[in-house]
Amino acid sequence: MTGDTTRLIQQLAGNVQPVRPLRRPWMRTVAWLAVSIPYVAIIVLVLTPRHDLILKLSETRYIVEQIAALAAGMGAAAAAFASTVPGYNRKFLILSLLPSIGWLGTLGHGCIRDWLQFGIGGLTIEPDWMCLPAIALIGALPAITISVMLRRGAPLTPHLTSALAGLAAAGLGSFGLRCTESHDAGIMVLVWQVGSVVLLSALAASAGRNLLNWRSISSASEGTVR
Amino acid sequence: MAVIQTTAEDRRLADLMQAAQSGDASAYAQLLEEIAPRIRRIVRAHWRFLGAEDVEDIVQDVLLSLHAVRDTYDPQRPFMPWLLAITRNRLADGARRYTRRESQEVHLEDWTVTFARNDANSTKETYGDLDALRHAIQALPEGQRTAIEMLKLREMSLKEAAAACGMSIGSLKVATHRAMTALRKMLGNEQ
């Protein structure tokens, strides 16, 4: 063993502090939801819930789509947390993304139903420019919270982890948005809401290495070493 | 293969890691001392072309990374897959760093111009006919002339010269080397 490495080992061992092992990804997801859901509820109240919300809660299609959006956010969050644990089974990532596929499936099914019911008119896309900022606003605190939580992990796949974190936060944002506005046409939700979620996830992915990198994590821990 | 561990061996390392997470310095030192040679073997097996210094850099990177994220180890899970995931990740980063550095460096076959060797600083480098030397320098291509003027006549450092003329340090070295060779030829001092 070279002298430098031996010295490094002595330094690391000499300054080692007790650490609490990270909780399992799904437990961290629950902790994240515990912070995020109340915030989403508050923002929905501030933005004013949709007038027909009670009526909508008895509508199977709305309930299924909302559960799917929520599950997509939760699954993506669990996958993001799992992706920062070295040696974690990568199959878990795929499993966690299944709710997202389910969410797209329910929206696609809604589009087909609209088309069958209203013809081509049921697939009309109207501008909804407030969708993106609204999802960003509702997903802001969940995004900040998950970013902070992910920094207590290994930045093994920073772009993928950030994309999943973006998907998680934007999924919650989309869930919240549908509690406030009355756009129910499948194609509108698919294009504007899912489009916004994908865009926000892509933006998060592009910032991955800035948010999560070994340099910042190592320097934080080296404070106790060097 | 070195990376395959028996379950008992893995359990022992996992116990050491668990003790390290509790703040046991001697268990941590023992763990790091035991895994360092394994990491070194893995690095060498993956990147045979790396020199000893580069291998050691990556080993130290892995140890620092392991230290930084030691709270991500779950004592209920095997230790070696956790360590290997970190090692593979740092290996990939190390390879990217190595490739980037190699692509930015200029390798010279003859370093006598910049090395502090006797022949690089011999009396042959002094020349009596200053007019002929001045003319020879003027006859050099612009980049080589600039390099000679800044580094040899004005005795600027490579860094200062690079900042002043906008050339990279590598280009300055190459230009200086070529200029010196050309000057020797022109002044009849070709070796």
Image (cartoon, coloured by chain):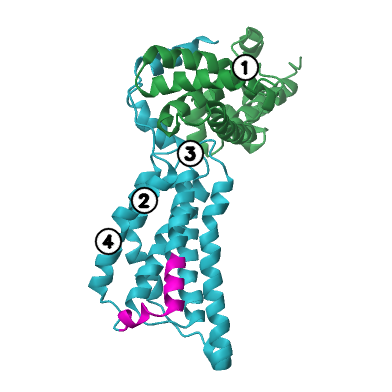
- The residue under the point 64% across, 12% down is B120
Circles 3 and 2: CB distance less than 8 Å?
Answer: no
Q: Earlier in the sequence, mark 2 or mark 4?
A: 2
Instruction: Single out the mark in the foreground, 4 or 1.
Output: 4
Task: Look at the image and give the residue range highlighted in magenta.
Answer: A52-69
- The residue under the point 40% across, 44% down is A150
Name the subunit of mark 4. Answer: A
Label 1 and label 3: CA atoms lie apart by 30 Å
| Foreground pick, B149 / B177 | B177
Is residue A75 shown above or below B152? below
Identify the amino acid type marked 2: Val
The dot on residue A85 is: 3
Q: Tell me what hue chain A is rendered in.
A: cyan
Would you name the residue on which mark 2 appears?
A30
Label 2 and label 4: CA atoms lie apart by 14 Å
Q: Tell me what hue chain B is rendered in.
A: green
Circles 4 and 1: CB distance less than 8 Å?
Answer: no
Would you name the residue on which mark 1 appears?
B52
- The residue under the point 51% across, 19% down is B13
> Disc 3 on helix, strand or loop?
loop
> Disc 2 on helix, strand or loop?
helix
Q: Earlier in the sequence, mark 3 or mark 2?
A: 2
Category of crowding for the residue at label 4, using alpha-carbon neighbours closer than 10 angstroms: few (below 14), some (14–19), many (at least 20): some
Q: Position of residue B102 (x, y in %)?
A: 64, 31
In the rendered image, residue A217 lying in the magenta stretch gets the answer: no
